[in-house]
Image (spheres, grey):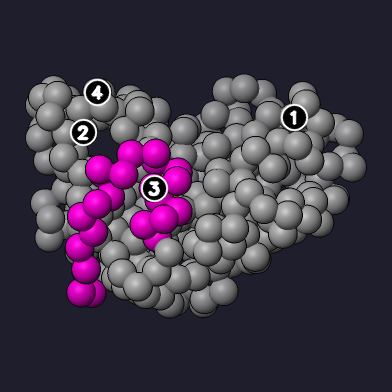
Amino acid sequence: MDKRAIGVFDSGVGGIAVFKEIIENNPNENIIYLGDTKRFPYGNKSKESIIELTKNGIEFLMQKDVKEIIIACGTATSQALEEVRKIYNIPIIGIIEATVKYVKKENIKNIGVMATVGTIRSDAWRKSILKEVPEAKIINKACALLAPMAEEGWIDNKIAQLTIREYLKEISKENEIEAVILGCTHYPLFKNIIKKELRSNVKIIDTGEILSKELREELTKNGMQNEENKPEYKIFLTDIETNFKNVATKLLQKEDIIKNIELAKI
């Protein structure tokens, strides 16, 4: 048994979707969440900047003595995960590997990927999918506005609906599409709208849900799960003058979890 917390790192509020899934699938685990709200968004930054910011986040969480780190950010996963794994002696999981494993297991071959500009530019999803499913057909779609809209809490209004409709034009008209990957952890906040814009038989793949189940399997396999049923949750932000609390409360529907937010000076 290992009582140490799981560290979760994201550029903003999007990782709360992963946080929520970890709570549901790993109910005994302590969690320390770090949102880099001061430097959000990551999607339009250079790879070098993203690597440096991710290193800062990992070092902060390691100082809190976490046992494993989840990079709950599609952009950081696609551009920094490989580099930080070479540097730090701690298990680090990103959202891409677990999702690709799921795609392969479910034999999904016609896939739409919604992600940030930086993630799409890196081509990480396409390369990772084709490595495991060489015959896959993939439509990438950069959705630059969705993460900032999520941070503002614009997740269920007319603007969100029209924006998503525009982004999904190419994907929704492709009749062979079997699934759409939400390649940024902010995007599950728009899941209901996305579902309405796609055919009913198109599977929406929530990377946070898959990642939390992968975490459970890994902790169990390595004997690192916490067996005490008294979980503690801590949330740190690099800038607390944001809309984070309102959006996170709406997503979690558990205000007691986020009533105490601390400032992370990194």
Pointer 3: what residue? 249
Left or right: where 98 falls relative to 155: left
Q: What span is colored magenta in the figure? A: 244-266
Pointer 2: what residue? 29
Residue type at mark 3?
A: Thr
Residue type at mark 2?
A: Glu
Spatial separation of the CA atoms under disc 2 and disc 3: 20 Å
Looking at this view, is 95 or 41 the one in front? 41
Rendering coords of residue 44 (x, y %): 57, 74
N-terminal of the pair, mark 3 or mark 1, is 1
Left or right: where 201 falls relative to 143: right
Spatial separation of the CA atoms under disc 1 and disc 4: 32 Å
Pointer 1: what residue? 202
Rendering coords of residue 199 (x, y %): 81, 31
Rendering coords of residue 8 (x, y %): 31, 50
Image quarter (top left, top right, bottom left or bottom right) of the N terminus: top left
Q: Residue, x 49% and y 69% (percent of image)? A: 42
Looking at this view, is 28 or 207 the one in front? 28
N-terminal of the pair, mark 2 or mark 4, is 2
Res 198 seen here: yes
**Closer to us: mark 1 or mark 4?**
1
Residue type at mark 1?
A: Val
Residue type at mark 4?
A: Thr
N-terminal of the pair, mark 4 or mark 3, is 4
N-terminal of the pair, mark 1 or mark 4, is 1
Q: Secondary structure at mark 2?
A: loop
